[in-house]
Image (cartoon, helix red, strand yellow):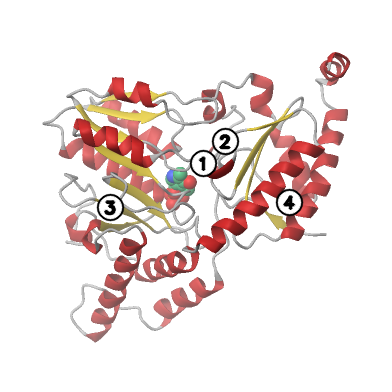
Amino acid sequence: MMYVYLDNGATTQVDPRVTGKIIKYMNDRYGNASSLHFKGREAKKALDKARHTIASSINARADEIYFTSGGTEGNNLILKGVAFANREKGNHIITTKVEHKCVLESCKWLEKQGFKITYLDVDEEGFVDIEQLKNAISDRTILVSVIHGNNEIGTINDLKEIGRICGEKGVYFHSDACQSYTKVAIDVQEMPVDLLTLNAHKIHGPKGVGAIYVRDGVKIEGWQHGGFHEMGIRAGTENIHGIVGFAEAVKLSLSSKHISYMTRLRDKLIDGVMTRIPYVRLNGPRGEKRLCNNAHFSFKFIEGEAINGLLDDYGICGSTGSACSEKTLEPSYVLKSLGLNHEMMNGSLRMTLSRFTTEEEIDYVLEVLPLVIRRLREISPFKEEQHVFNRDA
Ligand SMILES: *Cc1c(COP(=O)(O)O)cnc(C)c1O
């Protein structure tokens, strides 16, 4: 049997060249970057170099990059750190209904601390409502946070347009770019974005490491206190091997060839599913405004858990949506925000590709998935409805 990993939105295989770097820094170059001796200097040099690599990948300056333990910490640090550092200006933050859980939960916590949060709607493809955003900004607003590439349905929001609106109103603009990083070109000189969240394990780097970009001059307060690491924003001995691995992953991921390769396979998968299987909806947009590695479908009359369970038996790893909410059987809040009805929300399947995905794997999925869907529909409790549907169609 073939084994096909199509859950790269949850995490990715670490590139063996990244692993090689990590091992080198664990076994030989294990110094503490704060130590003054040659072992320390060796680590410090690697840390500086990695910071430059991340910075130049988004056209930022090295002193605008702060390493973190990943996307969750980065989003927490930015939302809470900007909120508390700018309390004098106001207490209002704007975000959307389709953010990653860690943004939404940070916002909920901030509400308990007295901040006011506006959660913007999205349209049926998952794009943020620009008019609603314009109307929501007031002189009490300090921050707007909008996800770049949506982790469930792949919608890519226009950072330039949103950033321009925020800039005109003098409000900081943050974007969670964990899914889009290296898959969509990001240039902070061209895009008026003040803060970004990045992580390593979605781009073939290790788990537990990431970075935030904070534009020079943006007021942010750290909440992890200790030594003067990360320019005083985030204390703790730097995870040198993880950071070096992250930088290596960035170097290996940055290529338009990877983007066009994944786009071609994504479209083959989407077109194949849409033509071979009836009663299916593609969630999220088509084309360039969709993450190059994301396909997300709703299949009528069946449950997403059942689809993924049966695909698992065939050696195929997919997911119902995002990995974090997989254990609750609640319909996804992202799909709810698109205005899907209940039966369309349940039969959801996300398949996320990587540059290691092969054409043979996509062919295999296109062979297996129609069988899986047909079998599940045969035993579906909505069978009667299917007959009515078939007769009416
Ligand atoms: C994965 C992900 C996160 C969380 O990152 P971790 O490094 O796993 O903590 C945040 N936002 C988005 C959009 C993600 O895809």
> Mark 1 vs mark 4: which is more N-terminal?
1
How far is the residue under mark 1 from the one under mark 4? 26 Å
> Mark 2 vs mark 4: which is more N-terminal?
2
Q: Which mark is residue 189?
A: 3
| CB contact under 8 Å: marks 2 and 4 | no
How far is the residue under mark 2 from the one under mark 1? 6 Å
The answer to whether 182 is drawn above or below residue 152 in the figure is below
How far is the residue under mark 1 from the one under mark 3? 21 Å
Look at discs 1 and 4 and give the one toward the viewer: 1
Residue assigned mark 2: 285
How far is the residue under mark 2 from the one under mark 3? 27 Å
| CB contact under 8 Å: marks 2 and 1 | yes
| CB contact under 8 Å: marks 2 and 3 | no
Residue assigned mark 4: 316
Say which amino acid is labelled 4. Ile
Can I make out residue 293 in this image? yes
Q: Is mark 2 within 8 Å of ligand 1?
A: no
Q: Is mark 4 within 8 Å of ligand 1?
A: no
SS at circle 4? strand
